[in-house]
């Protein structure tokens, strides 16, 4: 209760003042060929009937790092050409604030930097009696920091293991085996022979109660809170000079010294002593590595999905201003801006059309 009261106070303060100007982030790499080809298949934006009002956007960003500020401002500038009666109120104070603002009405559109947390969703449901309406607006990146890079599974380069399924990952990293028959604790259970067969598996991961781990818990551990008790957890470390070493880097540095370890991290932190494994939903669907193509078409199981949320009561129409703005985001123009002004990847045509259908 104290936390909810504090959140409400913070939201009220934020609603009375514009956010301070944040330092711009460095531009990401140019769009890949697959992203460019995907954009060409998307339907263009055709402005609907004129709407008026204010879009109050809360979400991904902070006063210090304006992760998506350029993107949101470009979106709105282009959108306003067809809808001049709409005003933007932009308050990107962070993903943690977004659903709280939507819950108490300070915001009308929440743009998250990751999947919604179970606690935030429960808070909204307790207040309204129904969940917020989710609209997928982007795919996470392969390896761009702050743009939801894909989770990857690494082993030491000396390890002969070549691939893993999601259910094998659950059995290795989890403790409850909710979706598998049993836990896996030795390399022989993953098919390795010889000296490897008798060796225990040592998992490496970030601290299991942080946001990164929440995604893995929902996607891989079937919602379980219980991790393999042998897992070694890492958090970012601040050096005496003030620089920060990310947990993903620390994880792979530790794995480089452990032939019998297995780790969750990102290719952005990879070193020459580790290798990333292809992953599959199941063996029948094929093993793939993370790439722009496999994240856009959703074949890679550990890719991230970027959502927006609105308050839409069951049986009621989508709020018209937010509906029209989301129609723009889910268009060739909106997705082109997304690719050019952020580290995110676009939705493919089938996904985008499915999300557009939710707005009707």
Image (tube, grey):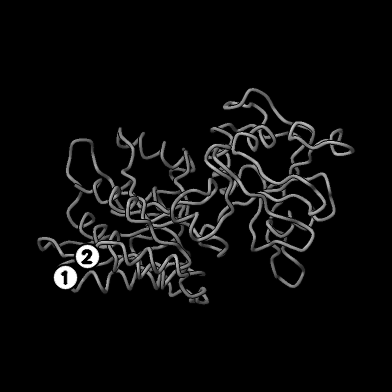
| Furthest-top residue in this view | 181
Q: Position of residue 82 (x, y in %)?
A: 16, 70
Residue lying farthest left?
49
Q: Residue at x 17, y 54 (%)?
A: 320
Q: Is residue 26 left or right of residue 116?
A: right
Q: Residues within 10 Å of mark 1 (few under 14, many from 20)?
A: some
In this view, the residue farthest toward the right is: 195
The answer to whether one can see residue 182 in this image is yes
The disc label shown at residue 45, or none: 2
Q: Secondary structure at mark 2?
A: loop
Residue visible at 74% across and 49% down in the picture: 155
Q: Is residue 229 left or right of residue 149?
A: right
Quarter occupied by residue 38? bottom left
Q: CA distance from mark 1 to mark 2?
A: 10 Å
Residue at 46% across, 37% down: 1
Left or right: residue 157 versus residue 71 is: right
Callouts 1 and 2 close, C-beta under 8 Å: yes
Q: Position of residue 220 (x, y in %)?
A: 57, 38
In percent of width and height, residue 310 lies at 29, 49
Label 1 element class = helix
For mark 1, what is the residue?
82
């Amino acid at each position: 209760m104290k936390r909810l009261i504090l959140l409400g106070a913070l939201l009220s303060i934020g609603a009375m003042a514009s956010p301070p100007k944040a330092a711009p982030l460095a531009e990401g790499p140019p769009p890949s060929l697959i992203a460019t080809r995907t954009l060409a298949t998307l339907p263009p934006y055709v402005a609907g009937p004129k709407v008026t009002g204010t879009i109050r956007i809360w979400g991904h960003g902070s006063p210090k790092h304006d992760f998506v500020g350029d993107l949101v401002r470009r979106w709105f500038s282009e959108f306003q050409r067809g809808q001049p009666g709409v005003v933007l109120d932009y308050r990107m104070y962070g993903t943690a604030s977004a659903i709280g603002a939507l819950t108490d009405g300070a915001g009308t559109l929440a743009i998250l930097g990751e999947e919604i947390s179970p606690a935030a969703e429960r808070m909204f449901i307790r207040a309204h009696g129904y969940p917020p309406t989710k609209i997928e607006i982007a795919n996470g990146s392969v390896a761009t920091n702050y743009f939801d890079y894909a989770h990857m599974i690494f082993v030491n380069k000396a390890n002969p293991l070549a691939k893993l399924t999601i259910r094998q990952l659950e059995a290795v990293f989890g403790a409850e085996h909710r979706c598998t028959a049993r836990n896996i604790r030795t390399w022989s259970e993953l098919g390795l022979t010889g000296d490897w067969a008798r060796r225990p598996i040592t998992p490496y991961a970030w601290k299991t109660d942080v946001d990164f781990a929440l995604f893995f818990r929902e996607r891989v551990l079937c919602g379980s809170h219980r991790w393999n008790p042998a897992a070694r957890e890492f958090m970012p470390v601040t050096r005496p000079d003030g620089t920060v070493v990310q947990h993903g880097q620390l994880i792979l540095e530790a794995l480089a010294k452990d032939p019998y370890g297995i780790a969750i991290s990102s290719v952005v932190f990879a070193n020459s002593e580790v290798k990333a494994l292809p992953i599959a939903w199941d063996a029948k669907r094929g093993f793939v590595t993370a790439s722009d193509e496999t994240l856009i078409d959703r074949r890679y199981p550990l890719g991230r999905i970027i959502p927006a949320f609105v308050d839409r009561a069951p049986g009621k129409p989508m709020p018209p201003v937010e509906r029209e703005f989301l129609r723009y985001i889910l268009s060739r123009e909106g997705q082109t801006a997304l690719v050019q002004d952020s580290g995110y990847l676009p939705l493919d045509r089938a996904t985008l059309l499915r999300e557009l259908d939710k707005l009707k």
